[in-house]
Image: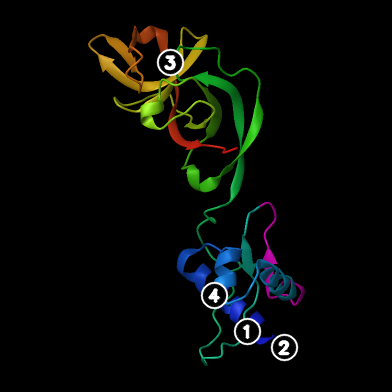
Amino acid sequence: MLTRKQHELICFIEDRLATTGVSPSFEEMKEALDLKSKSGVHRLISALEERGYIKRLPNRARALEILRVPERADGAAPKPATAGRDLPEPANDVVEIPLHGRIAAGVPIEAFEGSTSLPVPAALLGAGEHYALEVSGDSMVEAGILDGDYALIRKQEVARDGEIVVALIDDSEATLKYFRHEGAMVRLDPANRAYDPQRYTPAQVRVQGKLAGILRRYA
């Protein structure tokens, strides 16, 4: 037998999963149930988990799975549990992607110096394989890319004019720039009026990926 608040919470979670496929945040649950603190939500979640109504999914932020649902107070028939339902991935899942050193947003520098990993919200990434590079320099500031940001890069070897790419130059140095063709040359444009475009022959430049997003940490 569930308490009124437990019943309200599981119905709220069920409705949110059914409409968006994403578990509500603890703040949203607190407001929906008119609770004074998130600790009350934690207690309700733990009670529902102990009674076998929900399960917390490991290695995911705020991801809940409903195992069974009680009869609703409005007389509506219980909806099927979400287990096995083809729902979109929670928007704030965190995934680990390789972090390959620093990349210049000014002049080219050595890239891919070592490899660790960086936790990234899955919502920032689309399909495909990704890696991250720490930005060094200020030549892309007018595109909103600042020194110390993490550039999230989707691996690909081709690019269209106007896309921001990781360009590997002479197989030794990499830079983050706008990619454009200029006659028989490849032009890499900064997003800072203080810097000049860089021009190379196509044989000198290999696209290593396209910018998919930026992750910024605030002190």
Q: Which contiguous range is marked in magenta?
A: 49-59
Q: How far separated are the C-alphas under marks 3 and 1?
A: 58 Å
Q: Amino acid at mark 3?
A: Arg
Residue that appears at 54% across and 28% down: 148
Crowd tier of the residue under label 2, counting other residues whose Cα lies within 10 Å: few below 14, some 14–19, many 20 or above? few
Disc 4 on helix, strand or loop?
A: helix
> Residue tagged by mark 4?
32
Q: Nearer the viewer, mark 2 or mark 3?
A: 2
Q: Amino acid at mark 1?
A: Pro
Q: How far separated are the C-alphas under marks 1 and 2?
A: 9 Å
Residue 26 picture location, percent across and down: 61, 65
Q: Amino acid at mark 4?
A: Ala
Disc number placed over residue 1 in the picture, else none: 2
Dots 4, 1 in contact, CB < 8 A: no
Instruction: Give the vertical position of 21 relative to 75 (above or below).
Output: above
Name which of mark 4 and mark 2 comes first in the sequence.
2
Name which of mark 1 and mark 2 comes first in the sequence.
2
Q: How far separated are the C-alphas under marks 2 and 3?
A: 63 Å
Crowd tier of the residue under label 1, counting other residues whose Cα lies within 10 Å: few below 14, some 14–19, many 20 or above? some
**Camera-nearest residue between 203 and 212:** 212
Q: Is residue 116 magenta?
A: no
> Residue tagged by mark 1?
70
Dots 1, 2 in contact, CB < 8 A: no
Dots 3, 4 in contact, CB < 8 A: no
Residue 113 picture location, percent across and down: 62, 17
Name which of mark 4 and mark 1 comes first in the sequence.
4
Crowd tier of the residue under label 4, counting other residues whose Cα lies within 10 Å: few below 14, some 14–19, many 20 or above? few
Which quarter shows the C terminus?
top right
How many numbered circles does the render carry?
4
Disc 1 on helix, strand or loop?
A: loop
